[in-house]
Image (cartoon, rainbow, N blue to C red):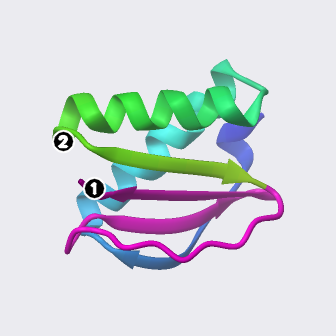
């Protein structure tokens, strides 16, 4: 179950409370969905709704990234074996 997975934040430029919301939203997404694209879509839509657009989300087990983000709007973390990159740009 997703809630049993521990969150490990690898890199963040985001307030602590929004970081926690990102982790909580990811746990919720992983409890609802099993397909990575659907997990990413859920997280992105929730953050667009809560913190205004435009958020981008990548979910997976093996990917590289190099992104430009707005200040204080970036987090990269693991939930179990799954990496989640969430950032606002645009």
The residue under the point 61% across, 72% down is 65
Question: Would residue 69 be found to the left or right of residue 11 on screen?
Answer: left
Q: Residue at x 57, y 66 (%)?
A: 77
Pointers 1 and 2 in contact (CB under 8 A)? Answer: yes
Specify whether 80 is left or right of 31: right
Q: Residues within 10 Å of mark 1 (few under 14, many from 20)?
A: some
- Residue 20 to residue 46: above or below: below
Q: Residue at x 59, y 51 (%)?
A: 58
Tell me which label, 1 or 2, sits earlier in the chain: 1
Q: Nearer the viewer, mark 1 or mark 2?
A: 2
**Residue 85 image-quadrant placement:** bottom right
Mark 2 residue element: helix
Location of mark 2 (residue): 51
Residue under numbered circle 1: 18
Q: Is residue 68 magenta?
A: yes
Look at the image and give the residue range highlighted in magenta: 61-90
For this view, does 46 lie left or right of residue 80?
Answer: left
Residue 11 position in % (x across, y down): 48, 80
């Amino acid at each position: 179950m997703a809630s049993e997975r521990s969150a490990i934040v690898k890199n963040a430029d985001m307030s602590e409370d929004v970081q926690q919301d990102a982790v909580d939203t990811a746990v919720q997404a992983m409890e609802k969905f099993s397909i990575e694209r659907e997990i990413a879509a859920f997280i992105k839509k929730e953050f667009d709704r809560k913190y205004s657009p435009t958020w981008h989300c990548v979910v997976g087990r093996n990917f590289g990234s190099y992104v430009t983000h707005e200040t204080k709007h970036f987090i990269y973390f693991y939930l179990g074996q799954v990496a989640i990159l969430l950032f606002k740009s645009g």
